[in-house]
Amino acid sequence: MTLRGLVGLLALVVLGLLAWELRWVLLVLFGAVVLAVALDVPVTWLRRITPMNRPQALVVVVSLLVIGGWQLAELLLPELLEQVQQFTQLIPALLRRLGELAGGVASLSSLEERLTSFATFDKLQPLGGQLLGVAGGAAAGTVQLLLMVLLALLLVLDPRSHQRLVVAATPAHFRALATELLGACRAALGGWLAGMTLSALAVFLLTWAGLAALKVPLALLSGLVCGLLTFVPTIGPTAATLLPLAVALLVSPGLALQVLILRLVLQNGEAFLLTPLLLSRTVNLLPTVALMAQLSLGALLGLPGVLLALPLVVVLQVISQRVLVEQIMDRWL
Protein backbone atom coordinates (compact mmCIF):
# COMPACT_ATOMS: atom_id res chain seq x y z
CA MET A 1 0.00 0.00 0.00
CA THR A 2 1.34 3.43 -0.96
CA LEU A 3 1.75 6.24 1.53
CA ARG A 4 -1.15 8.10 -0.08
CA GLY A 5 -3.43 5.08 0.27
CA LEU A 6 -2.39 4.59 3.90
CA VAL A 7 -3.12 8.23 4.71
CA GLY A 8 -6.51 7.94 3.01
CA LEU A 9 -7.37 4.79 4.96
CA LEU A 10 -6.31 6.45 8.22
CA ALA A 11 -8.45 9.49 7.38
CA LEU A 12 -11.48 7.24 6.77
CA VAL A 13 -10.95 5.54 10.13
CA VAL A 14 -10.68 8.89 11.92
CA LEU A 15 -13.80 10.19 10.16
CA GLY A 16 -15.68 7.01 11.09
CA LEU A 17 -14.71 7.32 14.77
CA LEU A 18 -15.60 11.03 14.75
CA ALA A 19 -19.00 10.29 13.18
CA TRP A 20 -19.70 7.66 15.83
CA GLU A 21 -18.81 10.08 18.63
CA LEU A 22 -21.05 12.72 17.06
CA ARG A 23 -23.84 10.28 16.13
CA TRP A 24 -26.49 12.12 18.14
CA VAL A 25 -25.53 15.44 16.56
CA LEU A 26 -25.70 13.86 13.12
CA LEU A 27 -29.03 12.25 14.01
CA VAL A 28 -30.47 15.63 15.02
CA LEU A 29 -29.09 17.17 11.83
CA PHE A 30 -30.60 14.47 9.62
CA GLY A 31 -33.92 14.76 11.47
CA ALA A 32 -33.83 18.50 10.81
CA VAL A 33 -33.21 17.82 7.10
CA VAL A 34 -36.20 15.46 6.98
CA LEU A 35 -38.41 18.02 8.74
CA ALA A 36 -37.09 20.79 6.46
CA VAL A 37 -38.00 18.77 3.36
CA ALA A 38 -41.47 18.15 4.81
CA LEU A 39 -41.94 21.89 5.32
CA ASP A 40 -40.34 22.81 1.98
CA VAL A 41 -42.95 20.84 -0.01
CA PRO A 42 -45.91 23.12 0.96
CA VAL A 43 -43.65 26.21 0.99
CA THR A 44 -42.55 25.55 -2.61
CA TRP A 45 -46.14 24.88 -3.69
CA LEU A 46 -47.35 28.09 -2.02
CA ARG A 47 -44.64 30.15 -3.69
CA ARG A 48 -45.59 28.64 -7.04
CA ILE A 49 -49.20 29.85 -6.84
CA THR A 50 -48.64 33.15 -4.98
CA PRO A 51 -46.12 36.03 -5.22
CA MET A 52 -44.85 35.35 -1.68
CA ASN A 53 -41.15 35.10 -0.94
CA ARG A 54 -39.76 32.16 1.03
CA PRO A 55 -39.93 33.67 4.58
CA GLN A 56 -43.54 34.76 4.04
CA ALA A 57 -44.55 31.37 2.68
CA LEU A 58 -42.84 29.64 5.61
CA VAL A 59 -44.70 31.84 8.11
CA VAL A 60 -48.00 31.02 6.41
CA VAL A 61 -47.30 27.26 6.37
CA VAL A 62 -46.18 27.16 10.01
CA SER A 63 -49.15 29.29 11.07
CA LEU A 64 -51.57 26.98 9.25
CA LEU A 65 -49.95 23.94 10.85
CA VAL A 66 -50.16 25.47 14.33
CA ILE A 67 -53.76 26.63 13.89
CA GLY A 68 -54.82 23.36 12.29
CA GLY A 69 -53.08 21.34 15.00
CA TRP A 70 -54.69 23.46 17.70
CA GLN A 71 -58.17 23.04 16.23
CA LEU A 72 -57.65 19.31 15.76
CA ALA A 73 -56.40 18.98 19.33
CA GLU A 74 -59.46 20.81 20.65
CA LEU A 75 -61.67 18.49 18.63
CA LEU A 76 -60.02 15.13 19.34
CA LEU A 77 -57.81 15.57 22.42
CA PRO A 78 -60.55 15.42 25.11
CA GLU A 79 -61.92 12.17 23.72
CA LEU A 80 -58.43 10.82 23.16
CA LEU A 81 -57.36 11.53 26.76
CA GLU A 82 -60.55 9.92 28.02
CA GLN A 83 -59.86 6.82 25.96
CA VAL A 84 -56.27 6.64 27.22
CA GLN A 85 -57.58 6.74 30.78
CA GLN A 86 -60.11 4.05 29.95
CA PHE A 87 -57.38 1.89 28.46
CA THR A 88 -55.27 2.10 31.63
CA GLN A 89 -58.33 1.00 33.61
CA LEU A 90 -58.92 -1.90 31.22
CA ILE A 91 -55.43 -3.38 31.61
CA PRO A 92 -56.27 -5.51 34.70
CA ALA A 93 -59.42 -6.78 32.99
CA LEU A 94 -57.41 -7.57 29.88
CA LEU A 95 -54.87 -9.58 31.88
CA ARG A 96 -57.66 -11.53 33.55
CA ARG A 97 -59.26 -12.18 30.17
CA LEU A 98 -55.98 -13.44 28.74
CA GLY A 99 -55.58 -15.67 31.79
CA GLU A 100 -59.04 -17.14 31.25
CA LEU A 101 -58.39 -17.79 27.56
CA ALA A 102 -55.03 -19.35 28.36
CA GLY A 103 -56.64 -21.73 30.83
CA GLY A 104 -55.72 -19.82 33.93
CA VAL A 105 -52.01 -19.41 33.36
CA ALA A 106 -50.42 -18.93 36.76
CA SER A 107 -48.07 -16.16 35.58
CA LEU A 108 -51.01 -14.06 34.41
CA SER A 109 -53.36 -14.83 37.25
CA SER A 110 -50.75 -13.97 39.88
CA LEU A 111 -49.47 -10.86 38.10
CA GLU A 112 -51.16 -8.49 40.53
CA GLU A 113 -49.71 -10.32 43.56
CA ARG A 114 -46.22 -10.26 42.08
CA LEU A 115 -46.48 -6.55 41.32
CA THR A 116 -47.67 -5.88 44.87
CA SER A 117 -44.67 -7.76 46.27
CA PHE A 118 -42.39 -5.15 44.68
CA ALA A 119 -44.15 -2.29 46.46
CA THR A 120 -41.59 -2.02 49.24
CA PHE A 121 -39.17 0.82 49.84
CA ASP A 122 -36.07 -1.28 49.21
CA LYS A 123 -37.39 -2.52 45.88
CA LEU A 124 -38.91 0.77 44.79
CA GLN A 125 -35.73 2.77 45.47
CA PRO A 126 -33.88 1.44 42.37
CA LEU A 127 -37.05 2.04 40.38
CA GLY A 128 -37.00 5.67 41.49
CA GLY A 129 -33.47 6.02 40.15
CA GLN A 130 -34.57 4.51 36.83
CA LEU A 131 -37.50 6.92 36.66
CA LEU A 132 -35.12 9.84 37.20
CA GLY A 133 -32.99 8.49 34.37
CA VAL A 134 -36.08 8.28 32.14
CA ALA A 135 -37.02 11.86 33.09
CA GLY A 136 -33.51 13.04 32.23
CA GLY A 137 -33.68 11.22 28.91
CA ALA A 138 -37.05 12.81 28.16
CA ALA A 139 -35.64 16.26 28.91
CA ALA A 140 -32.65 15.63 26.65
CA GLY A 141 -34.98 14.34 23.93
CA THR A 142 -37.10 17.49 24.23
CA VAL A 143 -34.03 19.69 23.83
CA GLN A 144 -32.93 17.67 20.80
CA LEU A 145 -36.41 17.99 19.28
CA LEU A 146 -36.41 21.77 19.76
CA LEU A 147 -32.96 22.02 18.16
CA MET A 148 -34.20 19.86 15.30
CA VAL A 149 -37.17 22.17 14.70
CA LEU A 150 -34.95 25.28 14.87
CA LEU A 151 -32.44 23.82 12.41
CA ALA A 152 -35.26 22.78 10.08
CA LEU A 153 -36.69 26.31 10.02
CA LEU A 154 -33.25 27.76 9.27
CA LEU A 155 -32.75 25.24 6.45
CA VAL A 156 -36.12 26.04 4.89
CA LEU A 157 -35.46 29.78 5.04
CA ASP A 158 -32.37 29.54 2.83
CA PRO A 159 -31.93 26.07 1.28
CA ARG A 160 -29.80 27.26 -1.65
CA SER A 161 -27.03 28.62 0.57
CA HIS A 162 -26.82 25.34 2.46
CA GLN A 163 -26.83 23.44 -0.83
CA ARG A 164 -23.96 25.58 -2.15
CA LEU A 165 -22.06 24.90 1.10
CA VAL A 166 -22.37 21.14 0.63
CA VAL A 167 -21.45 21.33 -3.05
CA ALA A 168 -18.41 23.50 -2.29
CA ALA A 169 -17.11 20.78 0.04
CA THR A 170 -16.85 18.32 -2.88
CA PRO A 171 -14.04 18.17 -5.48
CA ALA A 172 -14.52 20.45 -8.48
CA HIS A 173 -15.09 17.64 -11.00
CA PHE A 174 -17.84 16.15 -8.77
CA ARG A 175 -19.79 19.34 -8.12
CA ALA A 176 -22.21 18.95 -11.01
CA LEU A 177 -22.98 15.43 -9.86
CA ALA A 178 -23.31 16.60 -6.24
CA THR A 179 -25.83 19.28 -7.25
CA GLU A 180 -27.85 16.76 -9.22
CA LEU A 181 -27.61 14.26 -6.36
CA LEU A 182 -28.91 16.75 -3.78
CA GLY A 183 -31.87 17.57 -6.00
CA ALA A 184 -32.67 13.89 -6.52
CA CYS A 185 -32.44 13.16 -2.78
CA ARG A 186 -34.70 16.09 -1.97
CA ALA A 187 -37.28 14.99 -4.56
CA ALA A 188 -37.23 11.36 -3.37
CA LEU A 189 -37.45 12.29 0.30
CA GLY A 190 -40.22 14.82 -0.31
CA GLY A 191 -42.21 12.33 -2.36
CA TRP A 192 -41.74 9.61 0.25
CA LEU A 193 -42.85 11.90 3.08
CA ALA A 194 -45.92 13.09 1.17
CA GLY A 195 -46.89 9.55 0.20
CA MET A 196 -46.43 8.14 3.70
CA THR A 197 -48.37 11.04 5.25
CA LEU A 198 -51.34 10.44 2.97
CA SER A 199 -51.11 6.70 3.60
CA ALA A 200 -51.01 7.18 7.39
CA LEU A 201 -53.97 9.58 7.25
CA ALA A 202 -56.00 7.09 5.21
CA VAL A 203 -55.15 4.25 7.63
CA PHE A 204 -56.13 6.40 10.61
CA LEU A 205 -59.50 7.41 9.18
CA LEU A 206 -60.40 3.97 7.82
CA THR A 207 -59.36 2.19 11.01
CA TRP A 208 -61.27 4.68 13.18
CA ALA A 209 -64.37 4.37 10.99
CA GLY A 210 -64.16 0.56 10.82
CA LEU A 211 -63.70 0.11 14.57
CA ALA A 212 -66.49 2.58 15.30
CA ALA A 213 -68.79 0.68 12.93
CA LEU A 214 -67.95 -2.55 14.77
CA LYS A 215 -68.64 -0.74 18.07
CA VAL A 216 -65.16 -1.52 19.41
CA PRO A 217 -64.21 0.56 22.49
CA LEU A 218 -61.36 3.08 22.17
CA ALA A 219 -61.80 3.34 18.38
CA LEU A 220 -60.18 6.80 18.16
CA LEU A 221 -57.10 5.81 20.19
CA SER A 222 -56.67 2.59 18.20
CA GLY A 223 -57.05 4.40 14.86
CA LEU A 224 -54.50 7.04 15.87
CA VAL A 225 -51.95 4.41 16.92
CA CYS A 226 -52.46 2.48 13.67
CA GLY A 227 -52.04 5.66 11.62
CA LEU A 228 -48.86 6.80 13.39
CA LEU A 229 -47.23 3.37 13.20
CA THR A 230 -47.77 3.34 9.43
CA PHE A 231 -44.54 5.39 9.32
CA VAL A 232 -42.76 2.29 10.65
CA PRO A 233 -43.51 -0.27 7.91
CA THR A 234 -43.33 -4.04 8.49
CA ILE A 235 -43.08 -3.72 12.29
CA GLY A 236 -45.48 -0.83 12.93
CA PRO A 237 -48.77 -2.06 11.42
CA THR A 238 -48.42 -5.46 13.07
CA ALA A 239 -47.70 -3.92 16.47
CA ALA A 240 -50.55 -1.43 16.03
CA THR A 241 -53.06 -4.24 15.53
CA LEU A 242 -52.44 -5.50 19.07
CA LEU A 243 -54.25 -2.54 20.70
CA PRO A 244 -57.67 -2.83 18.98
CA LEU A 245 -57.39 -6.62 19.08
CA ALA A 246 -56.81 -6.64 22.84
CA VAL A 247 -59.66 -4.20 23.48
CA ALA A 248 -62.04 -6.21 21.29
CA LEU A 249 -61.02 -9.37 23.15
CA LEU A 250 -62.51 -7.89 26.31
CA VAL A 251 -65.89 -7.79 24.60
CA SER A 252 -65.90 -11.17 22.85
CA PRO A 253 -63.61 -13.46 20.82
CA GLY A 254 -65.97 -12.99 17.86
CA LEU A 255 -65.44 -9.23 17.89
CA ALA A 256 -61.68 -9.76 18.16
CA LEU A 257 -61.84 -11.95 15.04
CA GLN A 258 -63.75 -9.20 13.17
CA VAL A 259 -61.14 -6.63 14.24
CA LEU A 260 -58.34 -8.93 13.08
CA ILE A 261 -59.99 -9.33 9.65
CA LEU A 262 -60.50 -5.55 9.40
CA ARG A 263 -56.87 -4.83 10.23
CA LEU A 264 -55.59 -7.50 7.81
CA VAL A 265 -57.68 -6.00 4.99
CA LEU A 266 -56.55 -2.44 5.75
CA GLN A 267 -52.92 -3.42 6.33
CA ASN A 268 -52.64 -5.36 3.08
CA GLY A 269 -54.52 -2.67 1.17
CA GLU A 270 -52.12 -0.04 2.49
CA ALA A 271 -49.00 -2.14 1.89
CA PHE A 272 -49.81 -3.53 -1.58
CA LEU A 273 -52.15 -0.94 -3.12
CA LEU A 274 -52.12 2.49 -1.48
CA THR A 275 -48.43 2.94 -0.60
CA PRO A 276 -47.04 1.59 -3.94
CA LEU A 277 -49.50 3.84 -5.79
CA LEU A 278 -48.48 6.93 -3.79
CA LEU A 279 -44.75 6.13 -4.04
CA SER A 280 -44.72 4.93 -7.66
CA ARG A 281 -42.91 8.09 -8.83
CA THR A 282 -40.42 8.31 -5.96
CA VAL A 283 -38.71 5.52 -4.01
CA ASN A 284 -40.49 2.32 -3.07
CA LEU A 285 -38.47 0.44 -0.47
CA LEU A 286 -38.18 -3.33 -0.36
CA PRO A 287 -39.64 -4.74 2.89
CA THR A 288 -36.41 -6.61 3.64
CA VAL A 289 -34.32 -3.43 3.24
CA ALA A 290 -36.73 -1.43 5.40
CA LEU A 291 -36.78 -4.08 8.14
CA MET A 292 -33.00 -4.49 8.25
CA ALA A 293 -32.52 -0.72 8.38
CA GLN A 294 -34.97 -0.41 11.28
CA LEU A 295 -33.36 -3.26 13.20
CA SER A 296 -29.81 -1.97 12.61
CA LEU A 297 -30.44 1.68 13.51
CA GLY A 298 -32.74 0.66 16.35
CA ALA A 299 -29.95 -1.44 17.87
CA LEU A 300 -27.45 1.42 17.43
CA LEU A 301 -29.55 4.48 18.29
CA GLY A 302 -32.75 3.24 19.90
CA LEU A 303 -36.20 4.65 19.05
CA PRO A 304 -34.89 7.76 17.19
CA GLY A 305 -32.93 5.42 14.93
CA VAL A 306 -36.06 3.39 14.17
CA LEU A 307 -38.03 6.53 13.32
CA LEU A 308 -35.34 7.95 11.01
CA ALA A 309 -34.26 4.64 9.47
CA LEU A 310 -36.56 4.78 6.45
CA PRO A 311 -35.84 8.40 5.44
CA LEU A 312 -32.14 7.57 5.67
CA VAL A 313 -32.62 4.48 3.48
CA VAL A 314 -34.53 6.59 0.92
CA VAL A 315 -31.56 8.97 0.67
CA LEU A 316 -28.99 6.15 0.61
CA GLN A 317 -30.93 4.33 -2.10
CA VAL A 318 -30.82 7.40 -4.35
CA ILE A 319 -27.11 7.91 -3.65
CA SER A 320 -26.36 4.25 -4.34
CA GLN A 321 -28.22 4.36 -7.65
CA ARG A 322 -26.62 7.59 -8.87
CA VAL A 323 -23.08 6.98 -7.57
CA LEU A 324 -22.42 3.29 -6.95
CA VAL A 325 -24.47 1.91 -9.85
CA GLU A 326 -24.29 4.61 -12.53
CA GLN A 327 -20.84 6.09 -11.84
CA ILE A 328 -18.92 2.98 -10.75
CA MET A 329 -20.56 -0.36 -11.58
CA ASP A 330 -21.98 0.66 -15.00
CA ARG A 331 -18.52 1.96 -16.04
CA TRP A 332 -16.59 -1.03 -14.73
CA LEU A 333 -14.37 -2.48 -17.43
Image (cartoon, rainbow, N blue to C red):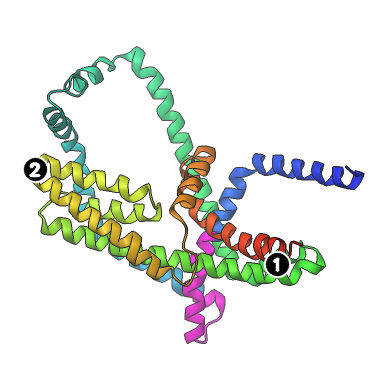
Chief SS of the magenta region: helix
Relative to residue 94, is residue 165 depicted above or below? below
Asked if the residue at tag 1 contacts the one at tag 2, i.e. Cβ–Cβ closer than 8 Å, the answer is no
| Residue 89 on image: x %, y % | 17, 37
Region of the chain picked out in magenta, as a range = 34-57
Locate residue 304 relative to residue 182 in the image: left or right: left
Q: Hey, what amino acid is under mark 2? A: Val
| Residue 91 on image: x %, y % | 19, 35
Q: Which mark is residue 271?
A: none
* Residue for badge 1: 178
Residue 299 showing in the rendered view:
yes
Q: Earlier in the sequence, mark 2 or mark 1?
A: 1
Q: Quadrant of residue 12?
A: top right
| Residue 53 on image: x %, y % | 56, 80
> Which residue is rendered at x = 16% and y = 35% of the image?
94
- Image quadrant where one finds the C terminus: bottom right
> Which residue is rendered at x = 59% and y = 44% of the image?
24
* Residue for badge 2: 251
Query: Considering the numbered disc 2 on the image, is that residue within a helix, a strand or a loop?
Result: helix
| Residue 242 on image: x %, y % | 25, 43
